[in-house]
Amino acid sequence: MTLQELVFQLERFWSERGCLIHQPWDAEVGAGTMHPETFFRVLGPKPWRVGYVQPSRRPGDGRYGENPNRLYKHEQFQVILKPPPDDIQDLYLASLTAIGIDPSMHDVRFEEDNWESPTLGAWGIGWQVLLDGQEITQFTYFQQAGGIDLAPISGEITYGLERIAMYLQEKDDVYDLEWAKGTLYRDVRHEEEFQLSRYSFELADVELHRRLFESALAEGTRLLAVDGGRAYLPAYDWTLKSSHAFNVLDARGAISVSERAGMILRIRKLACAVAKAYVDAVTPVPAATAEAERG
């Protein structure tokens, strides 16, 4: 199964089980969780089911295209089930069968691995899923996002697409993967990995990224004061930009230990304010309260 066929199969599987199939978010994110279809949709009481592929950029993980298993940018397939069905683990195992992995013939193990995103003010309890000893999925019950306790909680399933494809194709080097028939992962992504890695470690302008970080936080904060908080989506985009600027600075070795905690806290503060603005915008005002405000 090629990498793109793997994506097609997962999209078809989850679409048939009531998930909206969304597109990647057009911004630099460090994980699929940062996509608005996760960050916002897990907030509030409205049920939601969605699946999407998200390219995830982690500047510090770049290896100039020389490491067969570590990438600056990798692909995740993310599924959000809100609220999570009682048979969510069985659904997940069925999805493995749909992509050609028979759980009865392999060691599929759920190992406790609780998850946290300090910059998003988000955390959850769950497992990493190991297939014959290799992690292929992060499986999380979200408890909090944007500093807000979730009710109901959401089930998040994050598939590591390259790892799964390498397993299916029996490849030891990610660049030897067949992306499509006759086209290797190397043909699509190797030069990109080299150039982006070099940028993150050698070429990125440190002072520019410091200004970007400060400007992104300032613009996100300003937008939350516009039109009663109705600009929370662009404010969130600027939150993501501040996070990416931080990640580039971190990869360049331009952040001290003492600076690091403070910068993460500032991103988290903005993310939490954005989450509150979203909840305030989508939460109906009780009739009695609305009447009292008019009176």
Image (cartoon, grey):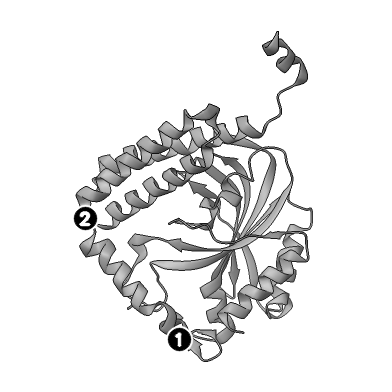
In front here: 101 or 184?
184
Residue 39 in the image: above or below residue 187: above
Please name the residue that numbered disc 1 is placed on: 176
x, y (%) of residue 190? Answer: 37, 79
Q: Mark 1: which amino acid?
A: Asp
Q: Quadrant of residue 197?
A: bottom left
In front here: 160 or 115?
160
Image point (54%, 65%), residue name: 76
Residue 181 in the image: above or below residue 103: below
What's the distance in space between the residues labelled 2 and 1, CA to CA? 33 Å
Pick out the residue farthest to the bottom: 182
x, y (%) of residue 77? Answer: 59, 65
Image point (51%, 51%), residue name: 34
Please name the residue that numbered disc 2 is placed on: 205
**Dot 2 or dot 1, earlier in sequence:** 1
Q: Please identify the quadrant where the N terminus is shown.
A: bottom right
Image point (47%, 40%), residue name: 235
Q: Is residue 110 left or right of residue 35?
A: right
Q: Mark 2: which amino acid?
A: Asp
Q: In the rendered image, is residue 242 in sight?
A: yes
Tell me the element at label 2: loop
Q: Please identify the quadrant where the C terminus is shown.
A: top right
x, y (%) of residue 31? Answer: 49, 57
Q: Is residue 188 left or right of residue 11?
A: left
